[in-house]
Image (tube, rainbow, N blue to C red):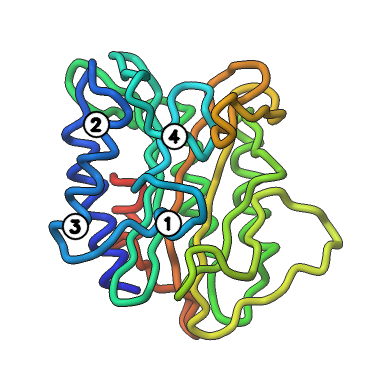
Amino acid sequence: MRQAGRILDEVLRQAVRQVKPGMSLWQIDQIIEAEILKRQASPGFKTVKGYNWASCLNINHGLVHGIPSKEVKVREGYLITIDAGVLFQGYHADKAVSFYLTEHGPSFKSKFLQAGIKALRLAINKVKAGGSIGEIAKALDQTISKYGYRVVPELSGHGLGRDLHEEPTVPQYYQAGYPYPSLAHDQTIAIEVIYTQGSPEFVTAKDGWTLETKDKKPAAMFEESVAATQDGYTLLTADSIEATCLQ
């Protein structure tokens, strides 16, 4: 899984560097798939029944599960979210990143994106064998709220391993008193922070996959795959906590 995670991190770094104004979402997905195959891995998202792409791509008010359309093209100033998975020797890795497309390339400098990056890093620091998943949820929810934004309660992270989506659910919305499960030694999870500048209410687009904010306000997402250990955590999709979210 660490090998799968390193491949996925390299793939997303290469893909983000190559995104240019005027590209279609389909072209971006083709870059991602080519980079995955180049590393003797396969697109993990294609193991999802009915999904035929290597990535989920969302722009501006898109939340998750965006289809890489040939018709939709990115422009300077767009907020772009790339979510992708790698399957390597029978094991999955999952990672996502949001960025603004500028004339100088990708930018993560906005307060909105920095909120998600900080929230995810604080949540990762809560990971350890025996630790409660509730502490992860609390770190995500409270940090995003502190910045004045909202997590989407219905959307969450998940376990992963031989399957892309496994138990347990890793929520980003915290409920005091809820009996959250604890993490086992070497348990592997994907932690996701999916949040909005406005209301967390969302709708499903006509394509049947893409989820978008109902009020059309911007949304962002960051995700890393992590393993719980006795000493804390092992990052699977980044080399260090400072290198998470493609920083």
Please give the residue where the numbered disc 2 appears in the rendered image: 27
77 in relation to 114, above or below: above
* Residue in the picture at 37% in, 67% down: 235
Callout 1 secondary element:
strand
Most extreme residue toward the right is: 177
Of labels 3 and 1, the one closer to you: 3
Name the side, left or right, on which 104 lies relative to 222.
Answer: left
Mark 4 near mark 3, Cβ–Cβ under 8 Å?
A: no
Image disc number at residue 37: 3
Q: Quadrant of residue 184?
A: bottom right
The disc, 4 or 2, on the residue closer to the chain's N-terminal end is 2
Which residue lies under the disc numbered 1? 224
Image coordinates of residue 61 in percent, x first then y, are 53, 22
Q: Quadrant of residue 130?
A: bottom right
Numbered label attached to residue 106: none
125 horizontally vs 20: left or right: right
Badge 2 amino acid: Gln
Amino acid bearing label 3: Leu
Residue drawn at (30%, 31%) of the image:
26
Cα–Cα gap, marks 4 and 3? 20 Å
The first of marks 3 and 2 along the sequence is 2
Looking at the rendered image, the disc whose residue lies closer to the viewer, 4 or 1, is 4
Q: Earlier in the sequence, mark 3 or mark 1?
A: 3
User: Above or below — where is 57 with respect to 110?
Assistant: below
Q: Residues within 10 Å of mark 2 (few under 14, many from 20)?
A: some
Q: Secondary structure at mark 2?
A: helix
